[in-house]
């Protein structure tokens, strides 16, 4: 039981490049979330999913897209990376709306 | 607007002593959940303790306990018998039903706790 895993752990992008972050969970959780964490700030919700095939916008969705084609995976995409998207990205999943388990994070730098 | 405020950016405590981290929040909801998460240098976010707003009894988890004052909208975390492994960033978080049918999570800015040997 690996819990919540995130791929990759680190990535450096140039402005304008695209990439996809993968979040995988093996706990059969319905709910999945993507957050970003910036210095001096708490986590801010980007997008979330309440089940396979569903996605919804969170607090800071602009510049990101998500997909949940399989229940165990939640993908976060950056179509055209910007320096403002330099951050640490956390994925979380949960069996209930008020319960979350976090992945180890992905550190993304956009130059 | 719903907010979570942690007014102590940094704190330190001697090993084996007790420390209390403060958190206040603002909401008009009646049913919600409050959390304390720990983020050690490894960056992994770990749930420390959770409190349901409808429960009057304060939650406890081993050396960790909360003082939940619903009327005052205060949710402090007490760590007893502090250990070096408690050194981490601690985040207070709040979750309440949103109009979309799920819960809206809001995190505070964190308190960096250092346990001194």
Image: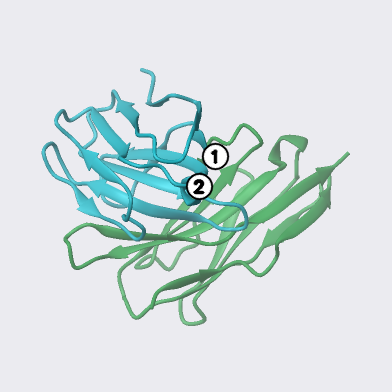
Chain colours: A cyan, B green
Residue indicated by mark 1: A111
Can you say which quadrant of the picture contains the N terminus of chain A?
A: top left
Check disc 1 and report its element: helix, strand or loop: loop
Report the side of B6 relative to A12 (left or right).
right
In this view, A102 is above or below B23:
above
The answer to the question of whether label 1 and label 2 lie on touching residues, with beta carbons closer than 8 A, is yes
In this view, A67 is above or below A1:
below
Check disc 2 and report its element: helix, strand or loop: helix
Label 1: few (<14), some or many (≥20) within 10 Å? some
The chain that hosts pointer 2 is A
In this view, B56 is above or below A21:
below
Q: Nearer the viewer, residue A36 or A97?
A: A36
Residue indicated by mark 2: A83
Q: Percent x, y for residue B38?
A: 58, 45
The chain that hosts pointer 1 is A
Q: Nearer the viewer, residue A64 or B33?
A: A64
Report the side of A5 relative to B10 (left or right).
left
């Amino acid at each position: 039981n690996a819990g919540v895993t995130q791929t990759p752990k680190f990535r450096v992008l140039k402005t304008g490049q695209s990439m996809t972050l993968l979040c995988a969970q093996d706990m059969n959780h319905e709910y999945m979330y993507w957050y970003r964490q910036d210095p001096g700030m708490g986590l801010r919700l980007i997008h979330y999913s309440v089940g396979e095939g569903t996605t919804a916008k969170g607090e800071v969705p602009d510049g990101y897209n998500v997909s949940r084609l399989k229940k165990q995976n939640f993908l976060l995409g950056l179509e055209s990376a910007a320096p403002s998207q330099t951050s640490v990205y956390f994925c979380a999943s949960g069996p209930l709306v008020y319960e979350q388990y976090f992945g180890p994070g992905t550190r993304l730098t956009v130059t | 607007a719903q907010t979570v405020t942690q007014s102590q950016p940094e704190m330190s405590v001697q090993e084996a002593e007790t420390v209390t981290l403060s958190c206040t929040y603002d909401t008009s909801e009646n049913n919600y959940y409050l959390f304390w998460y720990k983020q050690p240098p490894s960056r992994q976010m770990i749930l420390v303790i959770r409190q349901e707003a409808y429960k009057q009894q304060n939650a406890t988890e081993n050396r960790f306990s909360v003082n939940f004052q619903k009327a005052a909208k205060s949710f402090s975390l007490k760590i007893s018998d502090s250990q070096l492994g408690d050194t981490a960033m601690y985040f207070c978080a709040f979750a309440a039903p949103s109009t979309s049918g799920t819960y809206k999570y809001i995190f505070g800015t964190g308190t960096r706790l250092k346990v001194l040997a």
